Image: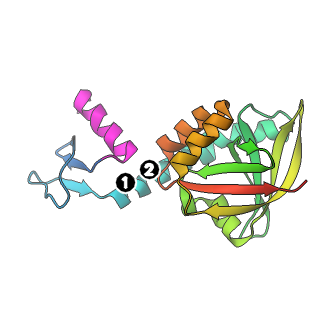
Amino acid sequence: MEWDTRHFASFQAFWSGTGDVVLTDGSLLVGLPSGSRCTEGGAIISVHERETMKHRIVHFLQKYLLNPPIKFLFAVGVVPPGYALLETTGRKTGKPRRTPVGYGLVGRQFWIVAEHGKKAGYVRNIADNPRVRLKLRDGLRARWHTGTAQLLSDDDPRERQRWLAKQLPSSANNAAAVRLFGTQLLTLRIDLEA
């Protein structure tokens, strides 16, 4: 099957979650009204199935391709610009679990918009034990800060990202990536200790 403009538009709609995508004999179609049936023998992919597939793809990319080099830089003492390292306690193992996150320090509060909401491992760890540590840039070095995290289910994550971009203009790129890769955005606030 050759890809043309229609296929890229379909993939973009699929990836961004703006409409159902129908697979019909190798082609992708977008925009069937809710409850429509495919008459050409294809299958309609539901929003839930799309989010599940998207979560699996993004999780794989983050776990094996994107996060390891960032974790390595933190391990050797180099703090990549725009990042922080979040350490939670594993809910099953009790071991420290480290996840790179976008830099979101405003005053003594650190803000995170989780891409996959309550499906994210670090969010589930925080729900079980809200005590966390953050490795943040401190001049040329990095240092650990302790704090208590809260899941803010009532907060509008997109509005929070807009607010955060005004506070920290460098966070705009991270916010765009979170919106692109995210499936169920959720705001977290970490209150850091003095």
- Residue identified by numbered label 2: 54
User: In what quadrant of the picture does the N terminus appear?
Assistant: top left
Residue, x 70% and y 72% (percent of image)? Answer: 128
What's the magenta bit mostly, secondary-structure-wise? helix
Disc 2: CA contacts within 10 A as few (<14), some (14-19) or many (>=20): many
Q: Between 68 and 36, which is closer to the camera in this rendering?
A: 36
Q: Between 119 and 67, which is closer to the camera in this rendering?
A: 119
- Residue identified by numbered label 1: 50
Compared across the picture, whether 55 is left or right of 124 comes to: left
Residue, x 69% and y 63% (percent of image)? Answer: 150
Residue range of the region highlighted in magenta in the rendering: 1-18
Disc 1 secondary structure class: helix
Disc 1: CA contacts within 10 A as few (<14), some (14-19) or many (>=20): some
- Circle 2: residue type: Lys
Quarter holding residue 172 = top right
Compared across the picture, whether 166 is left or right of 132 comes to: left
Q: As displayed, is residue 18 above or below residue 152? A: above
On whether residue 111 falls in the magenta region, the answer is no
Residue, x 65% and y 31% (percent of image)? Answer: 169
Mark yes or no: residue 92 visible: no
